Amino acid sequence: MKKIEIGHGSGGRLTRDLIQKTFLKYLSSEELKPLEDAAYINLKHHHVAMTTDSYVVRPLFFPGGNIGKLAVCGTVNDLAVSGAVPRYLSIGFILEEGFPIEHLEEILKGIAESAKQSGVHIVTGDTKVVEKNKCDGMFINTTGIGEIVKPLPLDNVSVGDMVLITGTIGDHGTAIALVRDEFTITANLLSDCAPLNDLLQPLFEIEGLKWMRDPTRGGVATVLAEVSDVTGLGVEIFEENVPVREDVRFISDMLGYDPLYLANEGKAIIIASHESANKILSILKKHPLGQNASVIGHVTSKFKGVRLRTKIGGERLLDMLEEDMLPRIC
Amino acid sequence: MDKTNDIIRLIHSLVPSDKKIRIMNVCGSHEHTIAFSGMRSLLPENLEIIPGPGCPVCVCPESDIINAIYLSKRDDVILVTYGDMLRVPTQKGSIRSEGKNFRMITSPFEALNIARSNPGTKIVFFSIGFETTTAPTAGILEMGVPDNLFILSSHRLTPTIMEILVKDAEIGIDGFIAPGHVSAIVGSNAWNVFSEKYGIPTVVAGFEADNLLLGIVEILRQLKSGKAQTGNVYKGVVKPEGNTQAQRLMEKYFEVADVNWRGIGHIPGSGLELRDEYSSRDARKVFELEEVKEAKIPGCICGTIILGKAYPSACKLFKKVCTPKTPKGPCMVSFEGACNIWYKTSSDTQNIEHR
């Protein structure tokens, strides 16, 4: 089996070979083809959104995805929830010496498929190889550029706004937990890793759309705690309305996790005016990725912080997650 | 929800306004439901639901964990135990941080399988917990364990510790919510002593919030009538006589012993050890293990919390240096530990809004 060698990161012939024979097999765009030091890209508007993220997920392959798919979806989603249409992506790879090329190709397939699905062009990239045991096989960094259609600053959020979620929560966190070595439990759980731009772009036209965020590490509770922290307002959510798959709930109970704090890689929290919430909900529900969308709460000035109204009508506070419940989940 | 509201209204009507009522739950899973459902925020201010010694991981003595660490360091041994036990801190570190050969299991049957598939290695099953986990351990012994499987028993008896609590005037318990899983084994009749001898209403409840609330109603009704009884609102699962087959097996393989409880101390007749006939399976005897004196963790009040004399939020270490990631005491480790549960649910008697 062909493997990554230190020379693949030398910048010389081996690097060129790896790029031309392996990377370009999967990642080909007009902008990338010239393999110049910088890509020439064409943006219709002058106002662009830009984001970058590094992916160090362990394991690299998990039910429902791999680090490559995650790296594209994560950055696409960061742009989409910012009210931008994702256009271009850069990808930087840090590969470990000895990493099987076959696995790299599998990951590149995931990248290519997600890029195609979300309509982004991968226009530039970088490859470095580090010695064996210096990284967990592969780290990926992606930077994305998108055209801003509807800026969504947190200042928009005000009392009376409704909080929505686009689907079931905790799917990614539990799927990753189950493939970790320590657990012997088997369940048919898939990560929800998916690009959300196609789901969210139609909402840009809705007047009452105020703010969005993809609740990755730290989950829904941590994102809402940040909303409260920045705005000084309170958020009340209703446990009954928060969609959680039965198997996710069961596994979470067993492992001692709270789905509200588990990572998601294909969900968005949306804050919208009271008047527009139902319209947004009906748009979401028409899309395959939004079928389980739900209004889960509202913004209030009665208190600060996040309060969960439980199924029996009790209340408990939701703080920010202080540390990951699982290592390297995105 | 309507039904829940009705039960809560009933609870409010049953609690006298001029008196504090303290009901203790003796099961980590009960505390879990109570905290995660925000139940305390719905109850009258003068009705306290106190977490008691319901977490098997929390009460496991430090000495047994240190012995488990020692065993896992032996080249001829693989130590197997439940996940939470791996992280419990001791003066010698935890099994995970200091141990060498150890594996996590979720049931005693996995211990049996590991022993069968590793015939050249001594497998020590560090078996902890109350009656609920003792019964399956007795079950594998009955199935016939291979020569290379040994049991490090750290089992504890629930009724015995409850009786200690009743006698402690400082705690002042008005009623017990008896543990659902333990009751399925020992039967609801096992709690008769509390109503008959001590006049304390004791009601077996399940793990759904509504069922627990019904248990509280039952206790309050008994307190109002002045007639303490053993109640059971978990009748689908718990029979008066319990699981007699499990009891027979526990009786066959284990005998009552005087043992230590972490943070509480020595309690005569409160634990279970393998009977002499099975001493060849007893890791304590086979490996000639010795008791290690328990070390005091500066600032940690887990022992006081287990006894229901303080809430987790009263501990100076709670949420500051003691977190689920960096537990200082045992109650912060386990999914069933009061501190762990209160940490995850941001529970604090100070921030519950009573209405």
Image (cartoon, rainbow, N blue to C red):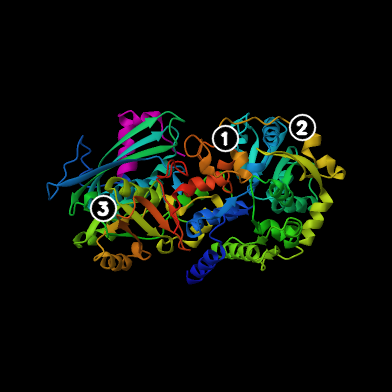
Relative depth, front residue between B155 and A300: A300
In this figure, which residue is indicated by the disc labeled 1? B300
Which labelled disc corresponds to residue B38?
none
* Residue B137 on the magenta span: no
Which labelled disc corresponds to residue B289?
2
Q: Amino acid at mark 2?
A: Leu
> Can I make out residue A109 in this image?
no
B134 over A54 or under it: above or below? below
Q: Amino acid at mark 1?
A: Cys
Magenta part mainly helix, strand or loop? helix
Residue displayed at 72% across by 66% down:
B239
Mark 2 vs mark 1: give the one in front: 1
Label 1 to label 3: alpha-carbon separation: 47 Å
How many marks the image carries: the answer is 3
Q: Chain of mark 3?
A: A
> Can I make out residue A30 in this image?
yes
Relative depth, front residue between B245 and A83: B245
Q: Which residues are magenta?
A: A1-24
Mark 3, secondary structure of its residue? helix
- Kindly indicate whether the residue at mark 3 contacts the one at mark 2 (C-beta within 8 angstroms): no
Rendered location of residue A12, percent (x, y): 30, 29
B258 over B251 or under it: above or below? above
Mark 2, secondary structure of its residue? loop
* Residue A17 on the magenta span: yes
B224 lies left or right of B2:
right
Residue displayed at 72% across by 62% down:
B188
Which labelled disc corresponds to residue A80?
3
